[in-house]
Image: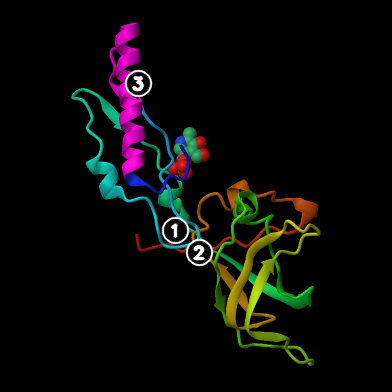
Amino acid sequence: MSNNLDGAAHARFLAGCLQWSLAAAAEHGVDLRMVNAGGGLGVDHTSDAMIELAALSRGVSVPAGVELIVEPGRVLAADAGWYAAEVLDLKHNHGTWFAVLRGGTHHFRLPAAWGYSHPFTVVARDTWDYPWPRPQIAGVPVTAAGELCTPRDVLTRAQHVNRLRVGDVLLFGRTGAYGWDISHHDFLRHDPPQFVLLGGER
Ligand SMILES: Cc1ncc(COP(=O)(O)O)c(C=O)c1O
């Protein structure tokens, strides 16, 4: 079970795990004290949605004397990370606007691996230290592509932007799980991202 967004269906999955374990324990004379049903609690990487935990907890009843364990991964970690990448260039090719990023799938591979378009927020940066005009686009869809020499290096396809300039930053949310950890970090020896830890008060 992976990235399940349906709490009631996940409850049925956990009930099935318990049922199977109880039957197997009875058959083999095992004193069953713990069932570990692993991860799989999902988040939608394209919205704020996540698995409905109330439906999940309502739907599972655990027999006395047995402890049910789950190993939540992305549902805890996804919202704890953001990926920010500077726009290096804007180019128009075969009818599509591309924002070329200082970064890409060697930092954040999930959208390319799963074949979806990861939403971003434009963070405007007003400084422009060059003597030539600053390239910009407005009111058009843009595809966010990385700096690698492969057509698979795409994070987002055709997201509308009110305004985007070279030097602005694209901020991708929900990247704390299966982001950096599943990416091909040393692709052609491009640099890793800078890691910034935002600490709370101790
Ligand atoms: C052993 C184990 N448990 C739990 C998880 C977390 O899974 P999820 O992110 O689906 O909750 C993983 C993910 O790699 C795993 O390997």
Foreground label between 3 and 2: 3
Q: Which image quarter is the C terminus in?
A: bottom left
The alpha-carbon separation of the residues under discs 3 and 2 comes to 38 Å
Residue 49 in view, yes or no:
yes
Neighbor class of circle 3 (other Cα within 10 Å; few <14, some 14-19, many 20+) is: few
Residue 182 place in picture, x, y as percent? 61, 47
Identify which residue is drawn at 22% across, 42% down: 58
Residue 69 in view, yes or no:
no
Foreground residue among 175 and 45:
45
Q: Which mark, by number, is residue 173?
A: 2
Specify whether 49 is left or right of 117.
left
Find residue 189 and report its image quarter.
bottom right
Determine if the C-beta at disc 1 is less than 8 A from ligand 1.
no
Q: Which residue is mark 3?
A: 20
Residue 166 place in picture, x, y as percent? 70, 81
Q: Which residue is mark 1?
A: 79
Q: Secondary structure at mark 2?
A: loop
Q: Earlier in the sequence, mark 1 or mark 3?
A: 3
Q: Earlier in the sequence, mark 2 or mark 1?
A: 1
Q: Please say if 155 is above or below 6.
A: below
Identify which residue is drawn at 46% across, 48% down: 74
The alpha-carbon separation of the residues under discs 2 and 1 comes to 7 Å
Specify whether 72 is left or right of 97.
left
Tell me which amino acid carries mark 1: Asp
Identify which residue is drawn at 53% across, 58% down: 175
Which segment is the magenta one?
Answer: 8-35
Residue 2 place in picture, x, y as percent? 48, 41
